[in-house]
Amino acid sequence: MSVTAAAGFRAAGVTAGLKPSGRPDVALVVNDGPEHVVAAVFTSNRVEAAPVTWSRQVVTDGRADVVLLNSGGANACTGAQGFLDTHRSAELAAVAVGVSAGDVVVCSTGLIGELLPMDKIESGITAAAGSLSADGGEDAATAIMTTDTVAKECTGFGSGYTIGGMAKGAGMLAPSLATMLVVITTDAVLTAEQADEALRAATAMSFDRIDSDGCQSTNDTVVLMASGASGVSPQMGEFTAILTQVCVDLAEQLIADAEGAAHDITIDVQGAANVDDALEVARSIARNNLFKCAVFGNDPNWGRVLAAVGTTSAAFEPAQLDVAINGVMVCRSGGVGDDRSGVDMSQREVKVEVFLHAGDADATVLTNDLTHDYVHENSAYST
Amino acid sequence: MSVTAAAGFRAAGVTAGLKPSGRPDVALVVNDGPEHVVAAVFTSNRVEAAPVTWSRQVVTDGRADVVLLNSGGANACTGAQGFLDTHRSAELAAVAVGVSAGDVVVCSTGLIGELLPMDKIESGITAAAGSLSADGGEDAATAIMTTDTVAKECTGFGSGYTIGGMAKGAGMLAPSLATMLVVITTDAVLTAEQADEALRAATAMSFDRIDSDGCQSTNDTVVLMASGASGVSPQMGEFTAILTQVCVDLAEQLIADAEGAAHDITIDVQGAANVDDALEVARSIARNNLFKCAVFGNDPNWGRVLAAVGTTSAAFEPAQLDVAINGVMVCRSGGVGDDRSGVDMSQREVKVEVFLHAGDADATVLTNDLTHDYVHENSAYST
């Protein structure tokens, strides 16, 4: 159900012919209200795609009616014409749905550096608007897939309200930086400020803590729309917690479908002086190619973990570091620990625990291994 | 000739049995004077190997007589026993050569997290000391190889003096973070301060500007020894320039022999506001796995270059970025430039030029592509 699980939303996904494969590639998510609250977070990449530049403006007033999404082209590094095309797409969607273009968020994903075929976009928008329905969430989730092998949806239930979301992307592991796009809807009654605050809290604990390959997209967008259709003004602590659960679930689905990955790796840093330290340590491991290759080889190579930790500025003493891999404490006090032949890495899930002994803060980052399939999928596909 | 090209030095390389392959694995480089000046730079990794901890102390007084090197074991993450082993190795070398243990620099390279077999180290030191000769440079360069496919040597000539060097390592692309070790000798007359200043200037422009895979070793060491045997006190501008040439030459040899690499990539950032900006941009590209995979696939994927540049804090306007790959300006003003089908990437050498249009500063970083062989060599080797 995803984005149409909450009351007040319709969605659609259609085939406009943007993808050579002939698979669905244009989606619409419409908020029928009664309220039209929006909040969004975008990529921090300074080279941002035209739809990101556009959508940043759309959400500044806290109101949006529609999210238009396309796969089959990122509309990034496309200059002034690319922005005009995004603007035109928003106008077409606005006319088709009967709203203002300034209330249409636009998201694109696919190859960088190519203009979108606007004739196909136009017919796609018309077709999508004609097939909007209150159970169109799955069609929409399917239409935003690029190299994803499965559609990614999630629904959470609060006290009298619902939160539903869809996502696309294989972390940041996809060809030509194909994008992480996420649309979340709720029928809770929220102010724009409440939506923004809850979304930033939820993404900080979910999408900001997955890191497939350290590569940052030009198009990443996470949008939250609130229709107020439930009539329920939620307790914000509960709402934020459920929203975070939905985001974590979708983030885990992204990592599980990351291109070429053979292992999903949970890096759990404990005993840090503060959360920033814990995150810096976790990310340094998540981005260490040597460690990620070792995991692909089912090798519990804790030396590579320590070498990655050593590059950070986090508070710790090298001689106090402990590392467990899949529950076996292979490194104790910065040196050899328990016999690493006892580590079973045959399963897809791998857990790395690093104990810094510098405080009480923890953080977890999800990543993948570095595999032949990753190299293949990111080098051999047609340009 | 390498480390024995300059007058006043002897060297040796022998087989001590540390490597299962039975190849040479212990080397000595001895400075017979009349002067015994030393300078060194070490890894900035906070998880540093025992020989690094030891050698930092040795060089603090600006004097050293011997560099003892072994392959076949990194002596990293080996705790108090590892440090005792390094100390013991220095004492053995000191006795064998007839100097003080406090003047013996020690370098180790190989697997992390295993103690060295000290009986083999001891017999290796005895054998190496017995075979020291003024033309032993090549033997020494061979004995420090790990996954290197060729020994790496270089000699430079100044006005009445000589600078010679040897290096090992495949950038930082090697299994278990096998190390970049470099020993450079000169018969110029230098003070310890002059040696230190010249070495830091030279390494900043050479070894600090290669980045195979962003992974930082626990053992990296670059040592410069000056014997004064030429009797020539060099003009320091000339000396530093020649030393830098020697270091750049060795750095290029490291990149050219990087494990699994199919392309050597020169990233040349021009028009930066300052050198730090230029380096930040160049490194962000050098560490972008998606771009490195594209190069492996002979794909001039400039969108991935821009996406990497966009993650930096350097001064630039996205709409002003130009990118040339192998001389073809594939990206102009942040958008599509010349036809990328005109880019020939069939050669091993690839040149990426990024024009920031923000100032007059330039910097160049050397890296490699990300290949199946990289994944294979870093995942499939025996642990």
Image (spheres, coloured by chain):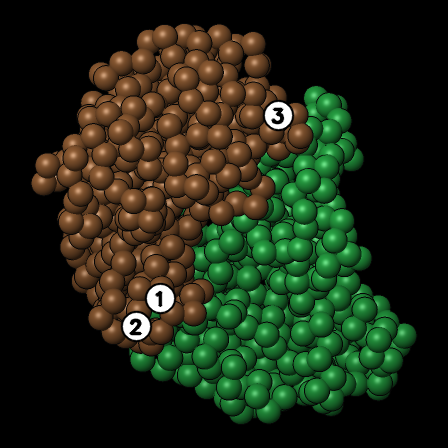
Chain colours: A green, B brown
**Where on the picture, by quarter, is residue A298?**
top right
Q: Whole-percent x and y of residue A285? A: 59, 46
**Residue sitting at x 79%, y 85%:** A189
Going from the N terminus, do you reach mark 1 or mark 3 first? 3
Q: Nearer the viewer, residue A333 or A279?
A: A333
Residues packed near mark 1 inside 10 Å, few (<14), some (14 to 19) or many (20 plus): many
Q: Whole-percent x and y of residue A129? A: 55, 77
Q: Tell me if residue A325 can be seen.
A: no
Residues packed near mark 3 inside 10 Å, few (<14), some (14 to 19) or many (20 plus): some
Q: Is residue A175 left or right of residue A27?
A: left
Tags 2 and 1 touching, CB below 8 Å = yes
Q: Chain of mark 3?
A: B
**Residue sitting at x 62%, y 32%:** B77
In the displayed structure, would residue A72 be above or below residue B104?
below
**Mark 3: amino acid:** Leu
Identify the mark at residue B277; answer none if there is no mark.
1
In the displayed structure, would residue A186 be above or below residue B1?
below
**Mark 1: amino acid:** Asp
| Disc 2 to disc 1, C-alpha distance | 7 Å
Identify the mark at residue B84; answer none if there is no mark.
3
Q: Whole-percent x and y of residue B111? A: 54, 25
Residue, disc 2: B273
